[in-house]
Image (tube, rainbow, N blue to C red):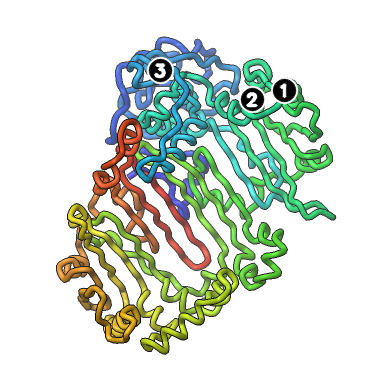
């Protein structure tokens, strides 16, 4: 399985946090082979970086022979030897373009993704990210393999309460994965025209601007590949937060002139720190930011980034407690909720691998989760191999039991009451005692599943597996059946199959499926798609999984053309998370065929 350093696991001390070693298995799918390098990289002076075939290293100055057997990331030549950005001429790589028009496109602008088929929005999001990042630059994306150097958080002020970073020059594994994924979709494949991804991003931002800036003459000579924005606490006497942007530049003088032209007379402050231009609303603000200790030196930030692992192409960080303090209405309406997130910090990253795109994140310092104990692993992998979709949560019973008063209060504020009234009615009509019976029904772990067999006939098999006291749980189910019947008799509702076990209760739409769910070795854990979608499945405390390939024929029935082609590339979706004390992590992965 790819070695994305998962949330909660730090990279080795000698490795940069935004770098991955052996990101893909050596035995994974190979890259195209036998495409000689005919141009693009000029002759380098002695000691300069010369890109070797990916996986076949040679001596400096040795001609490239194209992609060969994949080498674990981290055994490449030292990235620090690469010439400064902008000093090297990146030309076209004919070897990558000889695949035909279906490989790098016809030179036409990308067609907007369709929303047909129910999941068009997913294609649209993925396509937008890929186009923005590689911008039609297939050759460009593969040729720039450094990913090293100063990051925006190395120059932005440590007083930040929020931070967002976009990196158009991430680590090599990210570029190669992006390139491979983009080839799968018509909306992105047709946009590969070999251009600089920064051009696509600039055109997007400048699309509706009143002034027309020429990218080639006004921007390209100085623009680097990284952008960051820091959100600052409000200045004294103000209620509005401040903002400082960091734009990587290759020439400070040209950057100053180019930014002034883009501003078109608007007031702003600018300063330079290392190889970045810092921009703020006023010169005083930006001067102060340029002299401040950097965000990278803030212990909480650096610890969170280390726990997050690879920062990919897009990353963010937020001190949620300090941000919440800026919302007076929240403090006034629910000070208890504000107190529970007082020390919460959140960090996340969007990253790519050969077979999936992942949004990974962590949260730390959640007071509401402290004292909840250590939830057990979900056991979602024990479900039958024929499972098409499932959700599993551990520790919900404890959370509901200990936070019931706060849940009622929050529900009343959000919906104007009603939850307490329902609890009273349930008690009167069926003897359902809340929250005690709800705690029993949620148990230590609750897993809901849908089986793939029976979907074609319109009679899906659904069920639940609860880790709880089976006798008490059956009593609660009986109360719920009476409540749903309305007349207190329990008749008029579909029968529920029940299989009590040792510390478990299984409920299902049929006795046969209930028996299958009761087994501890159903085989889902051995499914390749499941393993990739739910990393570390044996330890996660919450998970959701859908095998899109198993239901593909259902949602593709009325989809035609490019929409069908794009949707067929989707393989599975997995969401997983782990909670330990006040800390938690999550991973959302979309897999591709």
Q: Do the residues labelled 2 and 3 touch (CB within 8 Å)?
A: no
Label located before the other in sequence (1 or 3)? 3
* Element type where label 2 sits in the image: strand
Label located before the other in sequence (2 or 3)? 3
Residue count near mark 3 (Cα–Cα under 10 Å), binned few <14, some 14–19, many ≥20: some
Rounded to the nearest angstrom, the CA distance separating label 2 from label 3 is 28 Å
Residue count near mark 1 (Cα–Cα under 10 Å), binned few <14, some 14–19, many ≥20: many
Q: Do the residues labelled 1 and 3 touch (CB within 8 Å)?
A: no
* Element type where label 3 sits in the image: loop
Please determine whether, in this image, residue 368 is positioned above or below residue 560: below
Q: Which mark is residue 258?
A: 1
* Element type where label 1 sits in the image: helix
Return the x and y of residue 432 as percentages of the image width and height: 39, 85
Residue count near mark 2 (Cα–Cα under 10 Å), binned few <14, some 14–19, many ≥20: many
Return the x and y of residue 556 as percentages of the image width and height: 28, 42
Query: At x 20% / y 76%, what residue is drawn?
Result: 499
Q: Residue 106 carries which label?
A: 3
- Left or right side of 387 for 266: right
Rounded to the nearest angstrom, the CA distance separating label 1 from label 2 is 9 Å
């Amino acid at each position: 399985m790819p070695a994305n350093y998962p949330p909660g696991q730090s990279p080795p001390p000698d490795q940069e946090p935004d770098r991955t070693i052996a990101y893909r298995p050596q035995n994974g799918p190979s890259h195209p082979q036998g495409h000689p390098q005919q141009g693009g990289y000029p002759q380098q002076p002695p000691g300069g970086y010369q890109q070797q075939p990916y996986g076949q290293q040679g001596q400096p100055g040795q001609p490239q022979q194209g992609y060969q057997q994949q080498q674990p990331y981290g055994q490449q030549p030292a990235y620090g030897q690469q010439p400064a950005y902008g000093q090297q001429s990146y030309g076209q790589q004919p070897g990558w373009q000889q695949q035909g028009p279906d490989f790098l496109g016809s030179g036409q602008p990308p067609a907007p993704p369709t929303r047909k088929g129910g999941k068009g929005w997913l294609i649209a999001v993925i396509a937008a990210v890929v186009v923005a990042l590689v911008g039609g630059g297939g050759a460009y994306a593969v040729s720039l393999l450094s990913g090293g150097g100063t990051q925006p958080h190395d120059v932005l002020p440590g007083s930040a309460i929020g931070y967002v970073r976009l990196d158009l020059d991430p680590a090599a594994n990210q570029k190669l994965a992006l390139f491979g994924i983009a080839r799968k979709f018509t909306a992105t494949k047709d946009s590969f025209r070999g251009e600089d991804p920064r051009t696509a991003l600039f055109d997007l931002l400048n699309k509706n601007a009143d002034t027309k800036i020429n990218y080639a003459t006004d921007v390209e000579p100085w623009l680097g590949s990284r952008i960051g924005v820091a959100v600052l606490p409000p200045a004294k006497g103000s209620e509005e937060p401040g903002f400082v942007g960091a734009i990587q530049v290759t020439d400070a003088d040209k950057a100053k002139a180019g930014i002034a032209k883009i501003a078109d007379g608007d007031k702003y402050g600018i300063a330079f720190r290392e190889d970045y231009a810092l921009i703020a609303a006023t010169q005083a603000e930006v001067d102060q930011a340029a002299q401040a200790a950097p965000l990278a030196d803030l212990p909480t930030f650096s610890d969170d980034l280390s726990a997050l692992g690879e920062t990919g192409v897009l990353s963010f960080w937020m001190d949620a407690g300090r941000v919440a303090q800026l919302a007076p209405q929240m403090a006034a309406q629910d000070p208890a909720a504000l107190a529970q997130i007082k020390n919460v910090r959140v960090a996340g990253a969007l990253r790519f691998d050969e077979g999936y795109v992942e949004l990974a994140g962590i949260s730390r310092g959640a007071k509401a989760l402290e004292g909840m104990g250590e939830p057990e692993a979900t056991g979602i992998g024990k479900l039958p191999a024929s499972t098409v979709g499932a959700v599993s949560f551990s520790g919900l019973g404890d959370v509901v039991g200990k936070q019931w008063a706060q849940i009622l209060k929050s529900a009343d504020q959000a919906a104007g009451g009603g939850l307490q009234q329902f609890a009273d009615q349930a008690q009167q009509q069926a003897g359902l005692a809340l929250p005690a019976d709800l705690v029993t029904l949620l148990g230590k772990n609750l897993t809901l599943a849908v089986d793939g067999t029976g979907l074609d006939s319109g009679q899906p098999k659904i069920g639940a597996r609860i880790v709880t006291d089976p006798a008490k749980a059956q009593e609660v189910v009986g109360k719920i059946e009476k409540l749903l019947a309305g007349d207190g008799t329990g008749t008029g509702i579909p029968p529920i199959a029940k299989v009590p076990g040792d510390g478990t209760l299984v409920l299902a739409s049929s006795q046969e499926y209930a028996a299958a769910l009761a087994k501890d070795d159903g085989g889902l854990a051995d499914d390749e798609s499941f393993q990739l979608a739910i990393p570390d499945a044996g330890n996660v405390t919450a998970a959701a999984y859908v095998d899109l390939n198993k239901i593909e024929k259902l949602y593709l029935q009325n989809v035609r053309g490019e929409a069908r082609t794009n949707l067929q590339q989707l393989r599975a979706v997995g969401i997983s998370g782990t909670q330990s004390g006040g800390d938690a992590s999550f991973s959302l992965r979309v897999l591709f065929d």
